[in-house]
Image: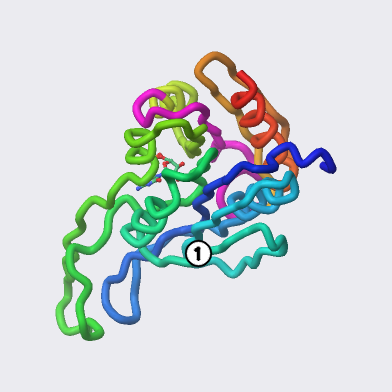
Amino acid sequence: NSKKSLAGKTVLITAGPTYEAIDPVRFIGNHSSGKMGYSLAEEAAKRGAKVILISGPSSLKTTNENIDIHRITSANEMYEKVFEFYRTSDIAIASAAVADYAPKVAATEKIKKNDDTLTIELVKNPDILKAMGEQKTHQILAGFALETNNEEENAKAKLEKKNLDLIILNSLRDEGAGFKNDTNKIKIFTRTEKLEFGLKSKEDVAKDILDCIENQILK
Ligand code: C5P
């Protein structure tokens, strides 16, 4: 894309999993690779945007010098970092697989296997995207939904509930979609439209998502 269609825009992207500490050596995490978020970051940077990428633990690296990467570990750290940059962003895309719950306390020493059962109390993490929706002023805000049932209804409900401009649905039922794969198959819901796409590389999915966001800006 030589048109630099996002020149002058700041794009905030969350990516990857979060890790929630249980003790100094253990955590609760998930299988998110960060690939979708990093692909979005590269594509937005190619289109001329200044990109703020807030990434949970991921082995991926960025290649475009217009990407400022901020690495965090937990959901609370991601929350703090997001709101350092949200106010001055034009577009925000939440692609991170944020842990819904975290251990209430992280043990300061490694937990020993003394007892036959072990209970870890969990507390709810902040919903970062929901908070972005509540604090939205001028931003175009996009989120993801990974659903196993009633997917379209749930995605549309999330669009409303989190005050989003668009939501990207990837279904766990589709072979090759979501999470750990290099490919994804998505549907995008805006306030007025539903767009369906075929299975493609996450690089190409990133193009479809950013095209849709650019169309929202033009409205
Ligand atoms: O509600 P649910 O977790 O299904 O919403 C998914 C969307 O919300 C994703 O875009 C994800 O990045 C974002 N999210 C978030 N903070 C959370 C949970 C989800 O930003 N604590």
Magenta stretch secondary structure, dominant: loop
Residue 209 horizontal/vertical position (percent): 64, 35
Question: Which image quarter holds the C terminus?
Answer: top right
Camera-side residue of 90 and 202 = 90
Residue bounds of the magenta highlight: 160-181
In the image, what residue occupies the spot 68% across and 40% down? 6
Residue 38 horizontal/vertical position (percent): 62, 55
In the image, residue 146 sits, relative to residue 31, either above or below, namely above
Quadrant where ligand 1 appears? top left
Figure quadrant of residue 162: top left
Q: Amino acid at mark 1?
A: His
Figure quadrant of residue 121: bottom left
In the image, residue 38 sits, relative to residue 215, either above or below, namely below
Camera-side residue of 59 and 69 = 69
Mark 1: C-beta under 8 Å from nearest atom of ligand 1: no
In the image, what residue occupies the spot 34% across and 70% down? 27
In the image, what residue occupies the spot 30% across and 70% down? 21
Residue 24 horizontal/vertical position (percent): 30, 81
In the image, what residue occupies the spot 52% across and 48% down? 12
In the shown orientation, is residue 36 left or right of residue 132?
A: right
Residue bearing the label numbered 1: 70
Kindly state the secondary structure of the residue where label 1 is placed: strand
